[in-house]
Image (cartoon, rainbow, N blue to C red):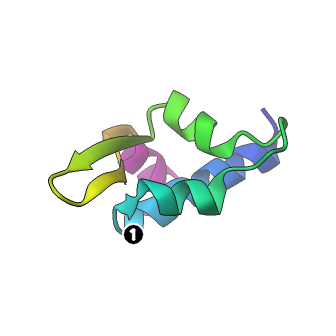
Amino acid sequence: MTGTTDALVLDLVEWIGREPRPYSEVIETWRTSCPRLTIWEDAVDRGYVARRSVGGQGVHVAITASGEKLLREHGRLG
C-alpha cells in the first residue's frame, strides 16, 4: 500500500460518508482498470464501506462503523 492509495481510500470513504450512494454511481466514479489502484476493493476489503440492498431502490453503498472510525481518526467526520 502506498500513501497515495491510502489517501484515495480515505477520500472514497469520506465521499460515501456524506450520504449513501447507489452502487452504480460508486463503481462508475471509483473503479479503475489500473491494477495498482484498487481503491474500491481496498475500502471494501478493509471493511470501511458495505453494499446494502435498499428495498425498491437497488443496491447502495454506505460507510460502516469502521469507516466512521477512520474518518474520525483523520478529522474528516462532519
Disc 1 marks a residue whose amino acid type is Arg
Q: Residue at x 50, y 65 (%)?
A: 15
Q: Does residue 46 appear to the left or right of 11 in the view shown?
A: left
| On-image quarter of the C terminus | bottom left
Front-most of residues 64 and 35: 35
State the residue lying farthest toward the left.
Answer: 55
Residue, disc 1: 18
| On-image quarter of the N terminus | top right
**Residue 63 sits inside the magenta stretch:** no
Front-most of residues 34 and 13: 34
**Residue 71 sits inside the magenta stretch:** yes
Q: Is residue 64 above or below residue 23?
A: above
How far from the left and from the top, in percent, is residue 39? 67, 44
How far from the left and from the top, in percent, is residue 52? 28, 44
Q: Which region of the structure is painted magenta? A: 67-78
Q: Does residue 50 appear to the left or right of 36 in the view shown?
A: left
Front-most of residues 76 and 46: 46
Helix, strand or loop at mark 1: helix
Q: Residue at x 84, y 37 (%)?
A: 36
How far from the left and from the top, in percent, is residue 42? 62, 35
How far from the left and from the top, in percent, is residue 67? 42, 45
